[in-house]
Image (spheres, coloured by chain):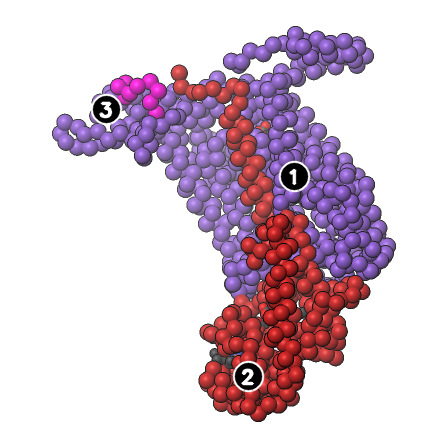
Chain colours: A purple, B red
């Protein structure tokens, strides 16, 4: 730490607060705990703020959601609408829909708050996924953080359901269509589907209970779970301490960054206002979910462009591209056309996500603790798997908007569907191969920079008249960061027999594991050895333009010939 | 359109609209008031029919045949369908919205600048109407929605949601149909053409004859469409295309913008000083 700060108790505020704080401390004695945690250190990198975007948009959701509960009525009882929106006045509709219209048109600030709430929800899910991807691609889930990863998966899953429940509450035509979709999902579960449907909807769809039930889940059960899990997530985070990028002075045993107070708390607190301000700005300028335009839900109506909110879009897409496989066994209709792409696929996604950390450590045999993050390129196979998964998700997602794409780009909707059907299988494979190659090339490039320095952009003419670009050694901090990764482990063939010729009892499993490990590491480029680095260092002296001639603050010349600042 | 919608709150906008409205009313009066009398007779006016026939021979016969009997392709398909009995309304719609004469062979004839003047369109309509009975161009009584009652407006909405939104989307933003066809946006379509579209059911669109939806209900639908399209928007609306566009905004503007802030925050901390010693 290079900053020095005045101890809190010596500041003006500190002196004034001392009395009450002492009073409190005498009674609940938290000082020790706080004193210890107040100096917790958090490292700084923009991608560590993705989780915070999720956190703060959740807080925004709580605040705006509370406002909405003052006026929303979770009832499916029919009432004639008599609010101020002309084109619907006199129409019979559920109280839920009517009260949402009232919030939009007759409650001061209601529409703005509704729009903030909806944008914050869209942002919350986006931030969760972005945050999860950052955790995945940097290997932050490795021991000891597997539990926090699992909590994260729980948050992701509950967030999905929470968002869906909210989307269904206003009981407009889109909500109802979305509920109908989920009803189909539930029913497609073989054998028990219909029973579950009756249980969930209290009878046949849509029934008269579902809005009230969803409301309870949306404002009480799910937020409660989210809140509890987020608290656990944060406690574990503080307990494990945050991971950090490798760099000088940063090891697996320490954390370099800001203390919780005053710096980090100020930054994080400030970021809350940025997130809140940002969602408010979006809500004030961008329309979202104009329920009055959709009309009240009526099972006999539907609108072109019916879509779920974006985070369910990939499920919608998977259903859209699934061939129509359906058959009956006796009285049972088995709807594989819905069951596979929706229920099964979602199950697979969450299962794969949940077991990944354990699977990876089984494959690599790595049981050590990790507090230093990995750059995505330094785990090429993992990164490639991640990108392949994103490609799969992306293709499904695009397929979910096939009608909008067809309309806006003048394409044939069937062509898009067929392309998606092919791409959903081929795309991930191509993405895997390409990503892994890119990672490996980047590893080579790093090694090159370590051994031969970086390109300065200075072209030198030698005495013989040949031209060459001068290289300069990397600044030491940079070279350190690049080499602060573990070596690629040696890959040995599994022993199928011991020296006495006795077959290894778990030979099959060991062989499988060895194969997986080879697949995981085989193409990795190892970092240069100490000898190679020292050897390469000598060559700088034979260089056309010896680096020690550069001024101290020099770090290369850009394409336009201007000296760069590193 | 963009210019209009962004400037609609300009202090002078009210006067401009008023002025425009007055001019329009005057122009409409000039166009229709005297024409009304002979509009009825026009359909039977032999001179008008003859004028229409000549226009038809030049502009339409190549596809629809010399006597509008239609032309078959070699494969047995329709090069241009028979127009006998399609009525004046179909011609007025197809020619008035610029769909006919069709420009190139596409999955569907699209809306474009009309090629014919109103007079010529009338003449063409008169000619086709003379070939066989068919729906006539609607009376102004059913396309004038200025006097619509509250109750009718709400009813129009119900009819619209039941019959039209499945293809045209709930704000009339349009929707995709199989094989590269689509239900077009209803933004800016005139009252008369809305009516005629329902009456004649162009291409993939079903016909909503007067038995299915009475002329009064058609007027209510038109009133609803016009009313909804003139409602103020709660911010830039992504064209009413719904959640797909919202999701795009959430990622690009929301996450994109916040990440930009995060990058800035992480780069401008108390501890981050100019590197390099
Ligand atoms: C409600 C949703 C979530 C909230 C509010 C949230 C919040 C946070 C915050 C503020 C951090 C610390 C800053 C950071 O590293 O970004 C964090 C760390 C972490 N999160 Fe989440 N998160 C959520 C969901 C998830 C999900 C879906 C996963 C993965 C499946 C996950 C896994 C992790 C892990 C492993 C860490 C530790 C990272 C490290 O120390 O480098 N979280 N979370």
Residue B32 shows up from this direction: yes
Q: Is residue B93 above or below residue A113?
A: below
Q: Is residue A542 magenta?
A: no
- Measured in 3D between alpha carbons, the distance from the residue under mark 3 to the one under mark 1, in whole angstroms, is 56 Å
What is the quadrant of residue A296 in the picture? bottom right
Which residue does the image show at 41% across and 41% down from the upper left? A438
Work out whether residue A63 or residue A411 is closer to the camera in this orientation and state it: A63
Q: Quadrant of the N terminus of chain B?
A: bottom right
Work out whether residue B269 or residue B52 is closer to the camera in this orientation and state it: B52
Give residue B124's mark: 2
* Contact check, label 2 and label 3, Cβ < 8 Å: no
Residue A212, percent from left and from top:
83, 48
Which region shows up in magenta?
A: A547-555
Residue A331, percent from left and from top:
77, 65
Q: Residues within 10 Å of mark 2 (few under 14, many from 20)?
A: many
| Front: mark 2 or 3 | 2
Q: Circle 2 sits in a helix, a strand or a loop, which is it?
A: helix
Secondary structure predominantly adopted by residues drawn in magenta: loop
What is the quadrant of residue B276 in the picture? top left
- Measured in 3D between alpha carbons, the distance from the residue under mark 2 to the one under mark 3, in whole angstroms, is 85 Å
Residue A315 shows up from this direction: no
How many numbered circles does the render carry? 3
Q: Is residue A382 above or below residue A470?
A: below
Q: Circle 3 sits in a helix, a strand or a loop, which is it?
A: loop
Q: Is residue A519 above or below residue A17?
A: below
For disc 1, the marked residue is A280
For mark 1, name the chain: A
| Front: mark 1 or 2 | 2
Q: Quadrant of ligand 1?
A: top right
For disc 3, the marked residue is A545
Which residue does the image show at 48% across and 42% down from the upper left? A384
């Amino acid at each position: 730490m290079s900053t020095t700060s005045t101890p809190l108790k010596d500041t003006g505020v500190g002196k004034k607060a001392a009395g009450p704080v002492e009073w409190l401390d005498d009674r609940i004695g938290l000082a020790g705990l706080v004193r210890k945690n107040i100096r917790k250190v958090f490292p700084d990198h923009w991608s560590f703020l993705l989780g915070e975007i999720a956190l703060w948009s959740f807080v925004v959701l709580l605040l705006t959601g509370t406002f909405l509960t003052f006026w929303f009525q979770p009832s499916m009882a029919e009432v004639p609408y008599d609010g101020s929106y002309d084109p619907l006045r006199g129409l019979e509709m559920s109280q839920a829909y009517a009260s949402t219209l009232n919030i939009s048109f007759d409650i001061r600030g209601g529409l703005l708050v509704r729009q903030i709430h909806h944008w914050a929800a869209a942002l919350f899910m986006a931030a969760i996924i972005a945050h999860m991807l950052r955790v995945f691609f940097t290997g932050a889930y490795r021991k000891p953080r597997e539990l926090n990863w699992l909590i994260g998966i729980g948050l992701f899953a509950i967030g999905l359901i929470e968002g869906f429940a909210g989307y269904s509450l206003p009981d407009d035509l889109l909500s109802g269509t979305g509920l109908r979709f989920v009803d189909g999902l539930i029913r497609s579960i073989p054998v028990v589907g219909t029973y579950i449907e009756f249980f969930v909807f209290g009878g046949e769809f849509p029934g008269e209970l579902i809005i009230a039930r969803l409301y309870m889940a949306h404002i009480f059960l799910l937020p409660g779970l989210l809140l509890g899990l987020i608290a656990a997530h944060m406690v574990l985070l503080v307990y494990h301490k945050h991971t950090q990028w490798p760099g000088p002075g940063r090891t697996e045993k320490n954390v370099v960054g800001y203390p919780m107070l005053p710096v980090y708390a100020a930054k994080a607190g400030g970021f809350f206002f940025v997130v809140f301000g940002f969602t408010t700005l979006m809500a004030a300028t961008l329309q979202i979910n104009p329920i009055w335009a959709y009309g009240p839900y009526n099972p006999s109506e539907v609108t072109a462009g019916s879509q779920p909110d974006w985070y369910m879009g990939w499920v919608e897409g998977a259903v859209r591209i699934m061939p129509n496989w359906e058959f009956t066994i006796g009285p049972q209709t088995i709807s594989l056309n819905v069951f596979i792409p929706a229920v099964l696929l979602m199950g697979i996604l969450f299962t794969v996500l949940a077991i990944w950390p354990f699977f990876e450590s089984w494959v690599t045999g790595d049981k050590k603790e990790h507090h230093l993050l990995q750059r995505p390129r330094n785990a090429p196979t993992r990164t490639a798997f991640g990108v392949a998964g994103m490609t799969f998700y992306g293709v499904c997602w695009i397929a979910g908007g096939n009608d909008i794409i067809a309309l806006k780009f003048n394409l044939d909707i069937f062509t898009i569907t067929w392309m998606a059907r092919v791409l959903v299988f081929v795309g991930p494979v191509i993405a895997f191969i390409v990503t892994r190659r890119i990672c490996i090339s980047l590893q080579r490039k790093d090694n090159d920079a370590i051994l031969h320095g970086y390109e300065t952009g200075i072209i030198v003419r030698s005495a013989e008249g040949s031209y060459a670009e001068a290289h300069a050694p990397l600044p030491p901090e940079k070279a350190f960061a690049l080499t602060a990764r573990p070596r690629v482990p040696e890959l040995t063939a599994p022993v199928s027999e011991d020296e006495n010729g006795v077959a290894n009892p778990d030979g099959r499993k060991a062989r499988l594991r060895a194969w997986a490990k080879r697949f995981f590491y085989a193409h990795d480029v190892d970092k240069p050895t100490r000898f190679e680095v020292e050897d390469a260092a000598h060559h700088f002296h034979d260089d056309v333009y010896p680096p020690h001639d550069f001024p101290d603050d020099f770090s290369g010349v850009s394409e336009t010939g201007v000296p760069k600042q590193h | 359109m963009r210019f209009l919608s962004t400037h609609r709150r300009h202090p002078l906008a009210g006067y401009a609209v008023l002025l425009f409205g007055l001019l329009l009313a005057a122009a409409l009066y000039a166009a229709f008031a005297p024409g009304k009398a002979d509009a009825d007779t026009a359909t039977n006016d032999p001179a008008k029919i003859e004028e229409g026939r000549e226009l038809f021979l030049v502009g339409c016969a190549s596809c629809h045949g010399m006597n509008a009997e239609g032309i078959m392709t070699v494969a047995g398909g329709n090069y241009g369908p028979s127009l006998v009995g399609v009525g004046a309304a179909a011609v007025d719609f197809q020619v008035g919205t610029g769909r006919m004469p069709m420009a190139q062979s596409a999955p569907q004839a699209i809306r474009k600048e009309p090629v014919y003047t109103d007079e010529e369109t009338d003449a063409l309509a008169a000619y086709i109407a003379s070939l066989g009975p068919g729906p006539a161009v609607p009376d102004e009584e059913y396309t004038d929605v200025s006097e619509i009652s509250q109750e009718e407006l709400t009813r129009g909405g119900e009819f619209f949601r039941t019959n039209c939104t499945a293809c045209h989307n709930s704000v009339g933003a349009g929707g995709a149909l199989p094989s590269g066809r689509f239900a077009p946006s209803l933004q800016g379509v005139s009252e008369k053409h809305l009516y005629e579209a329902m009456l004649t059911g162009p291409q993939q669109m079903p016909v909503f004859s007067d038995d299915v939806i009475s002329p009064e209900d058609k007027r209510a639908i038109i009133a609803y469409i016009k009313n909804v399209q003139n409602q103020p928007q709660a911010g830039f609306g992504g064209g009413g295309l719904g959640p797909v566009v919202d999701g795009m905004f959430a990622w690009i503007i929301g996450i994109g913008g916040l990440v930009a802030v995060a990058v800035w925050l992480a780069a401008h901390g108390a501890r981050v000083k100019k590197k390099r010693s």
